[in-house]
Amino acid sequence: MFIKFPISHAHGPTWSLITLSAERKQKGVASRRNLLSVFTLESKRNLHAWANKLAELFKEADRNDGRLSQLRRDWMSTPLVEA
């Protein structure tokens, strides 16, 4: 990535530093985006695993007494996002 603006030959080293700084900044943005993507993917996987385990627990509780468990009723009546 280049930052374009008029610069004299006397400021050649400054131009190099500005270019290098811009390139590092761009790489940093890309790295943060990649980390965020990985984190989001892992969070989704963990959420799915947790939801599946919870579903298994509910099924087991339902098999034991033949009706909705108190845990399931409580969980179903709790909003996912607090207002």
Image (spheres, rainbow, N blue to C red):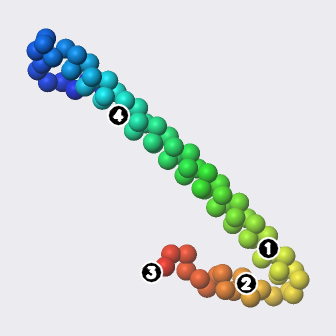
Marks 1 and 3, the one that precedes in the sequence = 1
Marks 3 and 2, the one that precedes in the sequence = 2
The answer to whether 1 appears left or right of 79 in the picture is left
Q: Evaluate if marks 1 and 2 touch, with contact meaning CB atoms under 8 Å apart.
A: yes
Q: Evaluate if marks 1 and 3 touch, with contact meaning CB atoms under 8 Å apart.
A: no
At horizontal 26% and vertical 18% (from top left) the residue drawn is 16
Q: Secondary structure at mark 2?
A: helix
Q: Secondary structure at mark 3?
A: loop
Q: Which mark is residue 83?
A: 3
Q: Secondary structure at mark 4?
A: helix
Q: Amino acid at mark 2?
A: Leu
| Mark 4, residue position | 25
Q: Is residue 11 above or below residue 82?
A: above
Q: Amino acid at mark 3?
A: Ala
Q: Amino acid at mark 1?
A: Leu
| Location of residue 57 in the rendering, given as x and y in whole percent from the top left corner | 79, 73
The answer to whether 71 appears left or right of 25 in the picture is right
Q: Secondary structure at mark 1?
A: helix
Which marked residue is nearer to the observer: mark 4 or mark 2?
4
Q: Amino acid at mark 4?
A: Lys
Q: Which mark is residue 71?
A: 2
Q: Which mark is residue 57?
A: 1
